[in-house]
Image: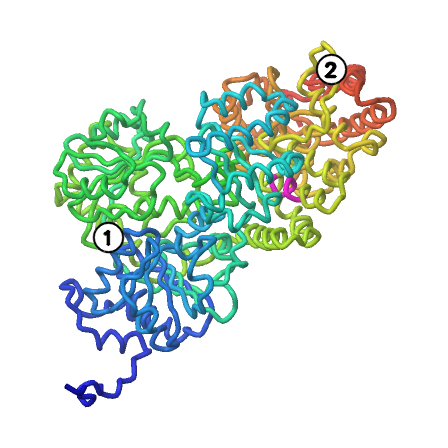
Amino acid sequence: MPIDFGKLSGSKPSKRPIDPIELFRTLNVTDPAINELWLVQGDALREWHSKRKQGDIAIVLNTGAGKTLLGLLIAQSLVNETNEPVVYACGSIQLVEQTAIKAQGYGLEVTTYFQQKFSNNLYQRRLAPCLTTYQALFNGKSRFSGEDIRAIVFDDAHTAEHLLRDQFTLTISRNKFGDLYSQIAQLFRSYHTRIGKNVGFLETVEGKDPNQCWLVPPFALREQISELERLLMSADLSEKTETKFAWKYLKNHIDLCLLFVSGLDISLTPPIVPVRTLPYFRDGIRRVYLSATLAAGDEFLRAFGKVPVTIAPETTAGKCERLIIIPSLHSECNNDVEVAKQILTKRKALILVPSNRRAKEWEDVVSGEQDDSITQQVEDFKKASAPATLLLVSRYDGVDLPGDTCRVMVIDELPSGLGPLERFLWEQLGLVKSLRSTIASRVVQSFGRISRGMSDHGVVVLTGKHLQEWLLTPNNQAALPQFLKRQLELGINLSEKADSISDLVDAASQCLEREPKWIGYYQKEMENTLNADNTNPADNTNPDEDASYIAQVEVNFGHSLWSRDYKAAAQYLDEALKRTFDISSNTGAWHTLLLGYCYELMGNIDEAHESYRRAHSMTNNIPPLIVQALSTSDQQFPPQVLEVATYLHQGGAQMRREIPKHFDLDLAALEGKGSSTQTEEALRSLGQYLGLTASRPDNEFGTGPDVLWKTPDAPVLSLEAKTEKHAESVYRKKELGQLRDHAQWVRDQLGSPQIFSAFIGPIIPASSDTNPDPDIMVIELSEFKVIADRLRAALEDICKQTLPTTLPQVVLDVFQQRHLLWPELYTQIQKHVLREIQR
């Protein structure tokens, strides 16, 4: 029978709506929870539509405020406008599937792509967006990289940084690549022997201390680069599922990566992910970032290489009722974890911990099998009845337990870094200031695991010293959303003023059992905050300028380095170094290490060695450069002597003829003409050049003394710089209290060493309402200028007379002769007992 072509003739296709609100009105919505767009969704869509031609737009909505519907409408709107490929990226396969189910309820057609399969052909026909994972989009062999994608919607954009980092990280697992792991570890054993850490390194690679992680510094990696590349190539990494995607990105850039060795694996990753090299970030592609936490500018820079236009409509949607309890703030609390366990008793609770070590604290209350399948654990927990507990390690996003599925959560300790580089920067270098917004985002994500909207309520218990310290720091609180900050203030007040520990346990019950007195108190206390929020919608939209500045420098450096423009990479770091040190001395030290490697790659060895020396001397957790083992015969030299000998030796022949290049510049503020910040840094630098471990805790951590000098098995010098005072001033009671408090901080951090505490300033008395301790001293700044002059002369003499084999002995002899060894040096300083000073 002939075909009836008339039956195949379709009607003329109607014009597809581009305005997202008009698009919504055409949908056949079957989801019973969706009747109409919420006001905040409409506001966000209208503003996006007015700016839709811009390349990068971030839309920020609270968890529970309808972010998924908004993102899907935008994606379909872009498909309708461009008739070109549009991708919607999610954090996991589970989230792709969840989003596809939601799209069906909204009446929107989508294509999904995961595990190398498309669910239908709508994406190829340019009729619908493709929902896929960040991993599928960004891996080194992504099928999407060759497509002419016109737009991408990034869901949960605040999680993207570590997902992108994972794609640029080559991981050699000890279990799956045993021989390769051992061969690479053996390459760097000699370096760790040279720096005196052979035993610890061996314990790690032999599995006796598996959680320890060692940074192999760039100069040590470069020493072995040819053999390292040979070993990697011989392992056929391009054929292995675990390695082939990262290998595609890194194989021609191994010498530009950082290498980390732990007892579990060896990782190679670039200092900065060169995201701009990916085709999805070229001009002409529109990118929309959806986030439930207001990511700061530095977060977007590190993740995506640029700062987007932000749309953050004010709304109360997603702002749930939350009782925060911090047991350690109560005077009777001896163990905050045990108090938290009392609150969890007979309830369903989620426990978030940063590490497997910390997870052991909760083994006695965890229910069910904690296997590797996070998805299955979460699903089982959702169906479980109380009592039940779910413990997740280093998982701060992608898990939603709203309503009765879970109303109690413990956040135990500060969220950890994800991946070896981030953990090194957080835990060993302590870059809590320059990474503040990243930490804040993880904290906010944690709070959102058991809350979805205004009608939700729950109890959050905070445990762990580092989490408490971070949350109590005003600058850190300022990085949190205003609503959460107010809830935290209520929790602090309750935790401190409760009559007993049992009252804290009872408060949780009152919240969960919906006691009217609790509800009335909470609503009254939060009312002012709600009003303040509505009148100040931009409270949290201003990025931290210092953090953004550092992030921009790092992004520029990282992309220049990856393109092998070493001169430009070095210039970005060098021109910013002074301001970077003012912001965070440890970040400055880290940048100095990277700057040194740029110099080495340029062939400027003297500048490279000087930078390596400076970086290590500023923080011992940056590994030192040892050009060759110093001959020390059988004599044991003090650590101070070895530090001086090391930095003099590392500079090559030139360094042994003259003092370090930056000596005079670093110590110029000891003349008394610099700012307080410059004076503190000069005092720190003087300690460094003396061979001591010198730091500025208050600058780095927001607490502790202005300047701290220490060396093993010797008293610590804790200094408070008060050089701005004049002859008519006094040392006030508050300043004296700060000095005592900072001395206690030093004891807590270092284990109760002997501490020399002193004000650095003019010889003036304390105020009449104070009672200074007899061991509190006042030292004039000029005394440290004298020390600097003595040290300069000593170094000049050492450089004139020494050879590599005699260097430590000469340093020891000269420092002994000139009374520069610590703590004898302290006895030579002219000091004044504060309580004895009279006008």
**Disc 2 to disc 1, C-alpha distance:** 64 Å
Crowding at dot 2, Cα within 10 Å, few <14 / some 14-19 / many 20+, comes out as some
Q: Residue furthest bottom?
A: 6
The 10 Å Cα crowd at callout 1, few under 14, some 14 to 19, many 20 or more, is many
Q: Which residue is mark 2?
A: 632
Q: Which residue is mark 1?
A: 452
Nearest to the observer: residue 522 or residue 151: 151
Secondary-structure class at tag 1: loop
Q: Secondary structure at mark 2?
A: loop
Q: How far across and how far down the image is residue 544, in percent?
A: 50, 52
Quadrant the N terminus occupies: bottom left
Tell me the residue at 31%/56% (across/down). 62
Q: Is residue 559 above or below residue 662?
A: below
Which quadrant: the C terminus?
A: top right
Percent coordinates x, y for residue 519 in the rendering: 17, 47
Magenta span covers which residues?
Answer: 590-595
Instruction: Give the foreground label among 2 and 1.
Output: 2
Relative image position of residue 237 (x, y in whole percent): 49, 43
Residue 719 falls in image quadrant: top right
The part of the image, by quadrant, that contains residue 652 is: top right
- The answer to whether residue 591 is magenta is yes
Q: Which mark is residue 598?
A: none
Q: Earlier in the sequence, mark 2 or mark 1?
A: 1
